[in-house]
Image: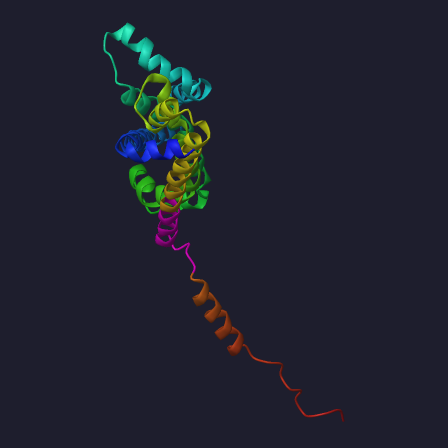
Amino acid sequence: MGDFFSYFSDHISSALSGLWVTVQATLLGALVAFVLSFVFGLMANSKPVIVRGISRVIVEFFRGTSLYVQLFWLYYAFPLISGYELTALFCGVVAFGMNYGAYGSEVVRGAINAVPKAQWEAAVALNMTPFQRMRRVIMPQALVQMIPPFTNLLIQLLKATPLLWLIGAADLTTVIQQMRDRTGASTPAYLTLLVIYFVLAYAMTLILNTVERAAKKRLGQHTDTRSLLRTRSAQGAAAPGPKAPVGGGAA
């Protein structure tokens, strides 16, 4: 065990380089997935049947096929067809973006449909255009509901990045695996991977939880507990007590 950590400390620059590739794949893949989630999610709620049909076919294709196969197809099969060779990181970003964008589109579609019908009717009554209704009324409310499931998808995307090792990307898993092969220490190598991935996932969760609280506060869904207790105490003190009977006792 000591041999691995000694080797790890001596080659920390390689580990940081692999970590950077993992972070890049996660963030860029999440960015692509975020954009595609809204594209396909809004298409799924559009009126034209053909637009909804195109969205449904694309979403079901990428949800119904393995991310593992999608990665291999982009890295090994696509160059044979197109004549263009893609880098492992680029293939990972595209595959992660398309796969998790398909799942994210269902989050967007569901969150938009979950906005109360009265909000839609009120926006129509105010004579807003469809774009204004979506931008100013519907989307701000839907975004708050999207954040928790988007957080889950982001963590799942992070946990899928070790698949890059299969197509030769120099990500964190690849670097740790190389260190493990040179030192022969499996337990500390995989324990190091577990700890690093846990720290990354926990940091992302904290960031998105902060974003969620800020979004709720902006919509007025945030309640200060101390203010609420003070308000209730004041209401209790101001409430009238039982009235004394008029006219004294019994005749």
Query: Which residue, as the protein is rendered here, is positioned at the far front?
Result: 3
Residue 18 sits in quarter: top left
Q: Nearer the viewer, residue 162 or 190?
A: 190
Looking at the rendered image, the quarter that the C terminus falls into is bottom right
**Residue extending furthest toward the right:** 251
Q: Residue at the location (33% across, 41% down)? A: 133
In the figure, 207 relative to 229: above or below? above
**Is 160 drawn above or below residue 138 in the view shown?**
above
Rendered residue at 30%/10% (across/down) = 78
Looking at the image, the residue that sits furthest to the left is 84
Quadrant in the picture for the N terminus: top left
Q: Which residues are magenta?
A: 208-223
Question: Magenta stretch containing residue 245, yes or no?
Answer: no
Question: What is the image's colouring?
Answer: rainbow
Q: Main secondary structure of the magenta part?
A: helix
Instruction: From the top left corner, tell me how far across and down residue 183 is, in percent.
Output: 38, 26
Residue 160 image position (x, y, % from top left): 40, 27
- In the rendered structure, the answer to whether residue 65 lies left or right of residue 16 reads right
Is 222 inside the magenta-drawn segment? yes
Task: Out of 3 and 189, give the one closest to the viewer.
Answer: 3
Can residue 88 be seen in this snapshot?
A: yes
